[in-house]
């Protein structure tokens, strides 16, 4: 049995990275692999994994590079090494590349391979800062996210591009299509500056000025932090400024994401992510901007559109085009589902990750 230690960015909530990690550990070959997920705190994600019979441990790993963590980080690193030893880990895989220094510490002391998952767009400086050169293998979720690695001197042979996946059995087109006079456009994600909900409202204002049949859903909630609460307040103030209260609906955090996606006619994403695969899986076209994995996940003109964010008039025009031609929008959604079945299945994703493990663990894949 091959024992693998996973490091998760969060245990208290489920974002895109946590969802992708769950897909992996819940669907890997459990007759061959024995996973243990390390989370910095308890909560929703930890409970989800435990219900799925995935062992978890709570161990706080303070930010390695912050001065205030100077002493604590070494104590945490030692605890992580002991945990890896107790688990009999053959390999360590972090779902958040900011934990790379901890991986290197384990690798140095236990002489086992380490894998870092890159889910964000990095700069070459960040690549060097977080010592990606010390990783045995790196998984990037897009070609674009792999470019800074290569620019920083990382051997391309160490990098594997594996796109995010989606549960195609859960995310399916609605059994009975809903026919409505309104065309519903949604944005999905935690309400925070990175997701650009304020820009989404700006787009909504331009669309509504030209087409009153369109409605907008902001799907997601804000974390209970001053920064996120302030941003949510600014989003709501912008809606009031443009008089869009009748046109923009806050759904809050949704635990029924397949249904939330089915309620849309079109997804707009301004930050990429696994929501693209989810929307396509339920048969919805997607409009995204050329950032992250978006250009590789959307087939432009077939399953949606990739449109520059600046100026926002381009996205506005595409929304109006589809809203005025719902049949065309529906056909794009059908093609999106077919493409998702081919490109974003969990089985394909897990198989590609397992192939990396096999290469790192050489030929003896029987375990001990």
Image (cartoon, grey):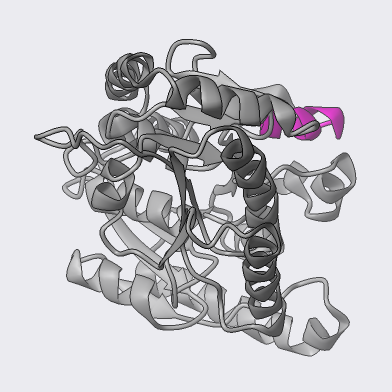
Check the image and report above or below for 9 versus 78: above
The quarter holding residue 240 reads: bottom right
Tell me, yes or no, if residue 161 can be seen here.
Answer: no
Where, by quadrant of the figure, is residue 243 drawn? bottom right
Find the residue positioned furthest to the top: 301
- Residue 334 seen: yes
Q: Is residue 170 left or right of residue 288?
A: left
On the image, the x and y values in percent for residue 10 come to 50, 71
When the figure is inspected, residue 161 is found, relative to residue 121, above or below; the finding is above
Asked if the stretch drawn in magenta spans residue 332, the answer is no
| Residue at 87% from the left image edge and 82% from the top image edge | 67
Image coordinates for residue 73, horizontal then vertical, percent: 71, 81
155 and 233: which is toward the camera = 233
> Which is more toward the observer, 83 or 195?
195
Task: State the residue lying farthest toward the left.
Answer: 175
Q: Where is residue 201 in the image (x, y as percent from the top left)?
A: 63, 52
- The answer to whether residue 152 is magenta is yes
Q: Measured from the top left, where is residue 13 in percent x and y?
A: 44, 72
Q: Give the range drawn in magenta.
A: 144-153
Q: Which residue is drawn at 63% across and 39% down?
A: 209
Residue at left offset 34%, top offset 64%: 254
The front one of 293 and 28 is 293
Give the dominant element type of the magenta stretch: helix, strand or loop: helix
Q: Which residue sits at x=75%, y=28%?
A: 147
């Amino acid at each position: 049995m091959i024992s693998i230690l996973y490091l998760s960015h969060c245990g208290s909530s489920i974002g895109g990275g946590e969802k992708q990690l769950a897909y992996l550990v819940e669907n890997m070959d459990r007759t061959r692999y024995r996973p243990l997920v390390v989370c910095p705190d308890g909560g929703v994600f930890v409970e989800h994994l435990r219900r799925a019979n995935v062992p978890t441990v709570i161990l706080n790993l303070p930010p390695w590079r912050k001065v205030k963590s100077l002493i604590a980080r070494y104590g945490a690193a030692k605890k992580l090494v002991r945990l890896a030893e107790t688990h009999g880990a053959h390999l360590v895989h972090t779902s958040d590349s900011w934990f790379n220094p901890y991986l290197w510490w384990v690798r140095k002391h236990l002489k086992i391979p380490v894998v870092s998952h890159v889910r964000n767009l990095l700069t070459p400086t960040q690549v060097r800062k977080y010592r990606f050169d010390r990783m045995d293998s790196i998984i990037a979720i897009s070609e674009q996210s792999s470019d800074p690695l290569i620019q920083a001197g990382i051997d391309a042979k160490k990098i594997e591009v594996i796109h995010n996946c989606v549960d195609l059995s859960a995310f399916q087109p609605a059994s009975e299509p809903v026919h409505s006079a309104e065309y519903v456009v949604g944005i999905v994600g935690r309400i925070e500056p990175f997701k650009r909900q304020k820009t989404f409202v700006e787009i909504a204002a331009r669309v509504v000025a030209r087409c009153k049949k369109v409605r907008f859903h902001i799907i997601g909630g804000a974390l209970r932090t001053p920064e996120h609460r302030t941003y949510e307040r600014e989003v709501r103030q912008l809606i009031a400024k443009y008089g869009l209260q009748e046109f923009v609906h806050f759904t809050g955090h949704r635990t029924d994401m397949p249904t939330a996606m089915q309620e849309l006619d079109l997804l707009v994403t301004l930050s990429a992510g696994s929501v693209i695969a989810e929307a396509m899986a339920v048969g919805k076209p997607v409009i995204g901007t050329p950032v992250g994995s978006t250009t590789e996940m959307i087939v432009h003109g077939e399953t949606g559109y990739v449109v520059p964010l600046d100026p926002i008039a381009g996205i506005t025009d595409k929304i109006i085009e589809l809203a005025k031609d719902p049949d065309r929008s529906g056909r794009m959604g059908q093609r999106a589902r077919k493409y998702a079945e081919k490109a974003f299945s969990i089985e394909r994703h897990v198989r590609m990750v397992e192939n990396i493990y096999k290469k790192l663990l050489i030929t003896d894949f029987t375990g001990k």
